[in-house]
Amino acid sequence: MADNVNVSNSPTSVNPDIPVRTIDKGGKQTQVMAVDWGGSGTESFTLPDFATETTLANIESTVATEATLLNINSALSSGLQATINSDVLGVAVTGQRNNEIELSFFSSFNTDLITNTTASGGSATITNGHARYRSGTNATGAAKGVSVYNCKYRPAHEQYAYFTAAFTTGAANSYQRIGLYDSNNGFFIGYEGTGFGVTLRSNAVDTFIARASWNGDPLDGSAGSKFTRGGVPEAINLGYSNLYRIRFAWLGSANILFEVFSPDGGWILFHDIRVPNSQLDPSIRNPNLPMTIDVAKTSGASDLSIYTACWGAGTTSDVFPINETLNEYSLAKLTRSVITGETSAGGGGFVNVKVTPSGSLTIALGDIDGVAGQETMADSLPVVIASDQSPIDVAQSGTWNINNISGTISLPTGAATESTLSTLNGKVTACNTGAVTISTALPAGTNNIGDVDVASLPAVVAATYSTSAVTSVVSSATSTSILANNASRRMAIMVNDSDKNAYVKLGTTASTTSFSYKLTPGQTLELPTPVYTGAIDAIWDAGPTGSMRVTEIT
């Protein structure tokens, strides 16, 4: 249909001889009138491809009705369905995702795949087919699990993390987190205090986006929400197990998508961190990330838990560098191969090549042809010494049986003779009784004496120390001295009694990248033996509150 109506000149009046006509189409009324342009010359009124009442009726007859839409929906439900998935970069993904992290918690923790840590009464257990990470009721209770392997970044490919999670209601001075992240970078969902939301962590700085500020589906059961059951929107229950995923493609500035699976099926985007054209620095500093689950408190008696049944994280790339290190849990497509060779027998048939139990090729000795000047015998290999090689040393250790030898045989230098043995015999008496008498004094220096019976040993007393000094060092986001050099130090104990991570350095000028130990809030450090006696500094994450409680024993 044409986009406009072409006329020869401007209209001047409505033709009174042609009344206004009203056309009713589906309850909508359209008024049509005749227009007289007036003036000299011939007037024209061109309506190219204009839809008439007849053409509109034809269109109406082909419009899908509710019944036809129901028929289409029924066909799709019967299996006539085609889904095209695309990654964060809009690239169609027609192959399978390639997991680099796989964990299921229906039976027990696999310590080759996950490292669990707990503190102050926290626990990590398997119950009812899923893992429970629990803080307990202690004021500083904590439980954490980190996958042993990382999800490794591949440029121009999506990285993803699929996981199930159920949360207890959040409490002040606590957090419940799960996602693809480490102590410095990554993305996770969960409670920060009493608020639920998503978090971007970049260079150890967290940006929390509360649920009220999400730019996707509100998941609150409101009209228009795609989180539906039987087509009816319902609010998400964070205390029930739900399936979540986090997707991103990095390249420094790709979007980060947070999604949840609807009861009616299909992924629902509830927040999109739109990084492009918003900042100078990359969204995160390092995209090679582990899966992490973490629940912790800094005060209060609330007993907090995160439940999770299964994790899967990886990339949409199915290729990796040739030098990629393989391990027992690396995933690869199963490939079987058979080596076949043509026989030298008449007819040139083909046979499969055999291998030993260890996988080495099996070669029969009898299949090896003789070498010029040598002949093979049963189960032997011919040996030929190259003309530019020295003769083989035929010296042999052990016992030699020599028979029918004529002439003089020269013994090697230092060999025992009758005279040397007679002299030695004169220096040793009563050998058959086990007693050995040394006729002359032992020479100066080291002498090796065999078994020696010791009548008694002096008592060994464990060292004890009775002096200790207990101090408190206020936490700071700048390097702070914890202990000065002390040659008399025998033990030192440090407790991070603050609300931020402390980075302790056996030496001066600590930083978040130059440290010996990282102490989480409430964690204790006892210096190992032998005890370090030099200066000790520490630094905390930004905005710390609390102190380092220090005990030095001398």
Image (cartoon, grey):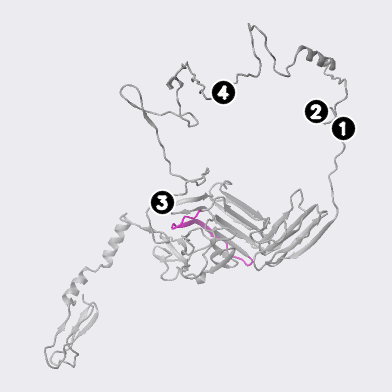
Q: Spatial distance from mark 1 to mark 3, Cα to Cα?
A: 73 Å
Q: Of tags 3 and 2, which is closer to the observer?
A: 2
Residue 104 seen: yes
Q: Label 4 vs label 2: CA separation? A: 40 Å
Question: What is the quadrant of the C terminus in the image?
Answer: bottom right
Q: Which of the 4 quarters of the picture holds residue 304? A: bottom right
Q: Quadrant of the N terminus?
A: bottom left
Asked whether 283 falls inside the magenta stretch, the response is: no
The three-letter code of the residue at mark 3 reads Gln
Relative to the observer, which residue lies in front, 302 or 524?
Answer: 524
Q: SS of the residue at dot 4? A: loop
Secondary structure of residue under mark 2: loop
Q: Earlier in the sequence, mark 1 or mark 2?
A: 2
Give the percent coordinates (x, y) of residue 458. Answer: 87, 37
> Which numbered circle lies on residue 448?
2
Residue carrying label 3: 96
Question: In this rendering, would 22 be left or right of 317?
Answer: left
Magenta residues? 152-173
Amino acid type of the residue tagged 2 in the rendering? Asn
Closer to viewer: mark 4 or mark 3: 4
In this figure, which residue is indicated by the disc labeled 1?
A: 456
Q: Label 1, label 2: how many angstroms apart (C-alpha)?
A: 21 Å
Type of the residue with mark 4: Ser
Residue 140: give x, y in percent of width and height: 68, 60
| Numbered tag placed on residue 206 in the rendering | none
Q: Nearer the viewer, residue 121 or 39?
A: 39
